[in-house]
Amino acid sequence: MSTPFYVSPQQAMADRAEYARKGIARGRSVVVLQYRDGILFVAENPSRALHKVSEIYDRIAFAAVGKYNEFENLRIGGVRYADLRGYTYDREDVTARGLANVYAQTLGTIFSSGAEKPYEVELIVAEVGESPADDQIFRLPHDGSIVDEHGSVAVGGNADQISSYLDQRHREGLTLAEGLKLAAESLARDNNGGERELTSKQLEVAVLDRNRSQQRKFRRILGTQLSRLLEEDGDGSGDAAGDADAEDAPEAADASETGDTADAGDGAAEEPGEDSGKKKK
C-alpha cells in the first residue's frame, strides 16, 4: 500500500490562494472611486445583460470580478440579507460594514475548507453617506479578508497598475465627468504600459448619488448620457438629465461574465436587487 502524498497546510493554503488569484486576474478590471456627489463604479464590460455592478440596498452597491456564477450567488445572498435585516429591524441598520462582514465570513469559510475550491472572485461593497467623509468602500479578496479603502480602488485584471495610476491622479472634489474620464483612462492602460481606447459601449457605469431625491441612491449611466459625460469638459454633474437613461437593465444569470472566467451560471433569472428597498415597515 502506497503512502499518501503529504502537503503541508501552509503549502495547501498558498496553492489555493494562487489558484484564486489567477482566476481573478483573468477578468476585466473594475474601478470604484469617490467623486463630489457620491461614489462612481466603472467596469470594462461590453455585456448589457451580465452586470459586474449592482444595487444591494438604499445606499449600498456591489461590484465584483471573477467567475460570474460565483459572485452572482454572493450578490443575491447580499440582497436577501439586506432586505431581511431592513424589514425585521430598521432600514438604517443595513450598512456596508455589516454586509462586508457577512461576505467575509462566507468567503473565508469557503477558502479555508478543503472540501471545495476557493471562489475566484474579488468584491467591492460601497455605501454613500451624507457627506464624502461618511462614504465607505470595502474590498474583499478571495480569502475573506476586509480592506477599508479610501478615494479609489481597482480589482481584477492588472489592478496593481490601475491602482497606482489612480493614486497619482485621484483627488477630492472630482466632478462626475472628471471621475468617469479618470476611471476610463486607468482601465484603458494595458500591462505593457500602453493605452487602448475604450468607448461607452465597452463600459458599465453606475453611481451612488447622494444628491438623488429618491431613497434609493443607485442609478446606472447609460446611452447618450454616458457618451456625453465621456466627451464633456465642464462640471459633468449631469444628474437630473440622466435619470431617464439610468434605469436598470434586466439582470440575467447566464453562462459567464463577458470577458471574465467562463463557467456555468446558477440559472437564476430573477433580480432581487431591482426591488430592493421598496418595502416599508
Image (spheres, grey):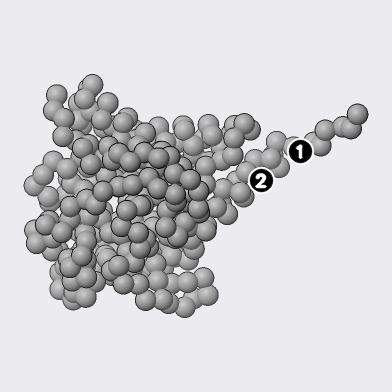
Instruction: Name the amino acid type tagged 1.
Output: Val
224, 40: nearer the viewer: 224
Residue 147 in sight here: no
Residue 8, position as x, y percentages in the image: 74, 37
156, 272: nearer the viewer: 272
Q: Are marks 2 and 1 in contact (CB under 8 Å)?
A: yes
Give the residue drawn at x 30%, y 67%. 201
Label 2 crowd bin: few (<14), some (14–19), many (20+), radius 10 Å: few
The total number of labels drawn is 2
Residue 163, position as x, y percentages in the image: 43, 62
Residue beneath disc 1: 7
Establish if 89 lies above or below 248: above
Residue 168, position as x, y percentages in the image: 38, 68
Residue beneath disc 2: 15
Residue 176 in sight here: yes
Name the side, left or right, on which 93 lies relative to 73.
left
Give the residue drawn at x 42%, y 53%. 257
Instruction: Name the amino acid type tagged 2.
Output: Asp
Residue 146: mark: none
